[in-house]
Amino acid sequence: MIKMKYGVKIIKNRHWPLSSLSILIVAALVGAMLVALIYYSLPALMREGLSVYTTNRWNPNANFFGGFAAVYGTFIVSLAAITIAMPLAVGSAIFINEFAPDKLRGFLIAINDVMAGLPTVIYGFWGLYVFGPMLNPTLFTWLHDNLSFLPIFSTKPIGGSYLLAATVLAIMITPFASSLVREVYVGVPRIMVEGIYALGLTKWDAIRIKLSYIAKSLLGALSLALGRGIGETVAVALTVGGALNVSLSLLSPGITIPSLIANQFGSAYTQIEQSALLSLALLLFIIGLTFITMAKLVLLRGGAR
């Protein structure tokens, strides 16, 4: 809506009240979840302190609730997953935007969207019954046999592991990350692209310059994908091994915060055990919220150039 006041045009967005209400509702829900998690985490945090996060002994029968193995596993699996997903997401976005014919481009985008919408339990069972049995005796065994002098491949693969969970998680978040990267990539100003080709540069030169131009936004997009994947439960719980273990080897079984909560909460009959699990959920909530907030800020700053 445009109004005239003292000869000056004033532009008013008629949808602003509705947008403001939506933002307030979302903020209230996030705040309510945070307050609830803090409230139910207090018994464990007041009794155990930060040892809930820093010690590695989880034995409810003996009233030990140290979740460091889950915290460690969450970071290891997430970082390994984004390391695997990054080249896949960027490569697929470049291929779709730069090289794929129009008909193939539409088909690939549709497949990408379908994969992004698949239930995570499908990825989990696929990783457990297909991907794991295929990778453990082949690629993972080769990594151990030939690169066991590296601590990250020092353990013989026998089942679920950090690396298997990270691989499945990477495949899960790649479609989402690819969509974000694709949107950022097509946002490069057309005048800049025309200037690149006017200088006689090749398509590969243009791709390299575009990637350098969107580097910050690219980082934000991948961080947003990581923020979405860091709390994944079912697929990771089925493939990570479920061991309260801290190991430098990616081929070792381990556990993450979501998988520990999924495995233990149903049998957590005491208030202190439930509170300890919820204190880990609080940490996961803060980590995920931090990643997503930082990613959004980076994307906004990158898009404002």
Image (cartoon, rainbow, N blue to C red):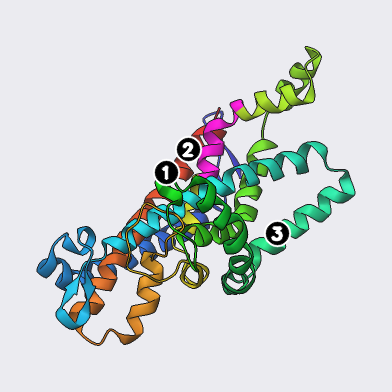
Q: Few, some or many C-alpha atoms within 10 Å of disc 2 (few <14, some 14-19, many ≥20)?
A: many
Amino acid on which disc 1 is placed: Met
Residue 155 found in image quarter: bottom left
Tag 3 residue: 113
Left or right side of 217 for 26: left
Q: Do the residues labelled 1 and 2 touch (CB within 8 Å)?
A: yes
Check the picture and name the quadrant holding the C terminus. Answer: top right
Tag 1 residue: 294
Stretch in magenta: 212-222
Q: Can residue 23 be seen in this view?
A: yes
Q: State the separation of the CA atoms marked 1 and 3.
A: 25 Å
Q: What element carries label 1?
A: helix
Q: Principal SS element in the magenta part?
A: helix
Dot placed on the residue nearer the N-terminal end, 3 or 2: 3
Residue 246 percent across, percent down from the top left: 32, 59
Identity of the residue drawn at 45% across and 40% down = 297
Q: State the separation of the CA atoms marked 3 and 2.
A: 24 Å
**Rendered view: 305 above or below 122:** above
Q: Does the magenta stretch include residue 124?
A: no
- Residue 298: image tag: 2
